Amino acid sequence: MNLKPLSILTLAFGLALSTSTLSLSDDCHRHGGQAADAPAGSSQTYTTKGLVKEVNPGAKKITISHEAIPDLSWPPMTMGFVVESQTLLDNLKAGDKVRFDFQPQGDNYLIQDIEIVQ
């Protein structure tokens, strides 16, 4: 087989692109409806609404049943979040409707701001 240098480069680029696309697709869908991992080093902030299910100020954690988050390909679900500051949980209780901002951070999802809504 006699391939020109440009053909070899094109073939290598196409192979690399298809491999990375398959890897990204697998990552987005591998959890089957559960929260998928955000890209490493992601500092993207997401905003959504939900219903507080449980508040644990001592552990700086809150469980929220939230709306779908299309940017993460997440369906509506109930999941735990950690908070940046325990004071964010001071006036919250189960049953509160909230709007909140969070960022993926390692294996956790960190709430930076949360407010009660009507």
Image (tube, rainbow, N blue to C red):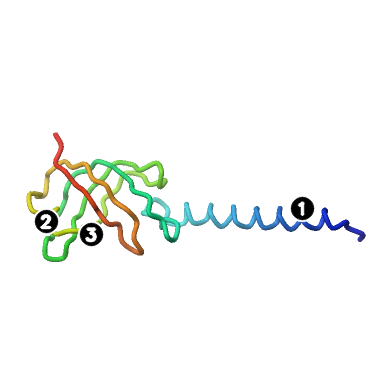
In the displayed orientation, state which residue is furthest to the left. Answer: 91
The label nearer to you, 1 versus 3, is 1
The label nearer to you, 3 versus 2, is 2
Nearer to us in this view, 94 or 104: 104
CA separation in Å, label 2 and label 1: 55 Å
CA neighbours of label 1 inside 10 A, class few (<14), some (14 to 19), many (20+): few
Q: Total marks drawn?
A: 3
Say which mark, if any, is on residue 31.
Answer: none
Residue 10 x/y as whole percent = 77, 53
Secondary structure found at label 1: helix
CA separation in Å, label 1 and label 3: 46 Å
Location of residue 56 with respect to 47 vertically, above or below? below
Secondary structure found at label 2: helix
Quadrant containing the C terminus in the rendered view: top left
Left or right: 76 as drawn, with respect to 2: left
Q: Amino acid at mark 3?
A: Val
Residue identifier under label 2: 87
**Is the C-beta separation of discs 2 and 1 under 8 Å?**
no
Q: Amino acid at mark 1?
A: Thr
Secondary structure found at label 3: strand
Say which mark, if any, is on residue 10.
Answer: 1
Quarter location, residue 83: bottom left
Of callouts 1 and 3, the N-terminal one = 1
Location of residue 50 with respect to 107 vertically, above or below? above
Nearer to us in this view, 48 or 7: 7
Residue 8 x/y as whole percent = 81, 58
Which residue appears at 17% of the width and 58% of the height?
A: 85
CA neighbours of label 2 inside 10 A, class few (<14), some (14 to 19), many (20+): few
**Is the C-beta separation of discs 1 and 3 under 8 Å?**
no
Residue identifier under label 3: 82
Residue 98 x/y as whole percent = 18, 42
